[in-house]
Image (spheres, rainbow, N blue to C red):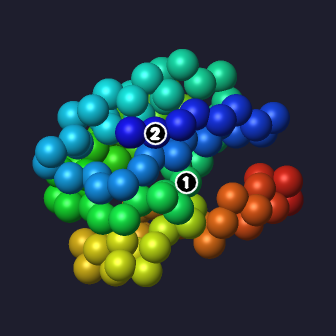
Amino acid sequence: MGTNILEREFATFQPQGYLSAANAGDFLQQLTEVVNSSTKSSLLVDMQQVEFIDSAGLMALIKGFHLAKDLDCGLSICSVAPSVRMIFELTQLDKVFEIFDSQDSFRQTIQVG
């Protein structure tokens, strides 16, 4: 479902494939584990390999976002495919999540901030 990568400044979680009702529970469990175990102040969800997301996948992301916020950890998203980005825009979740074009653009923001 996903891969965890620890960088110096932030942790990265990389889900793959479809984030849908069929696997949203597993996705949320993995995301929760990453958020709870992270010692970093920022978590980046790299969605480069996500082909599709439905309302259940979005809800899992929102729950992960709130959990991270409760633990004083920022949760951002990067590398969103155009079709997936359209879902974020239609649901106006692009106003909730900070979405970056790539890991590099996120990294630059972290270094500047």
Q: Is residue 4 above or below residue 109?
A: above
Q: Position of residue 28 (x, y in %)?
A: 31, 35
* Relative to 63, 34 lies left or right: right
Q: Position of residue 41 (x, y in %)?
A: 65, 34
According to the image, label 1 marks what residue? 46
Q: Is residue 6 above or below residue 79?
A: above
According to the image, label 2 marks what residue? 2
Which residue lies most toward the top here? 37
In the rendered image, the quadrant that contains the N terminus is: top left
Of badges 2 and 1, the one in the foreground is 2
Q: Position of residue 72 (x, y in %)?
A: 55, 32
Residue 103's tag is none
Report crowding for label 2: few under 14, some 14 to 19, many 20 or more residues within 10 A (C-alpha): some
Mark sitting earlier along the chain (2/1): 2
What type is the residue that disc 1 sits on? Asp
Q: Position of residue 35 (x, y in %)?
A: 49, 29
Pick the residue in front: 67 or 79: 79
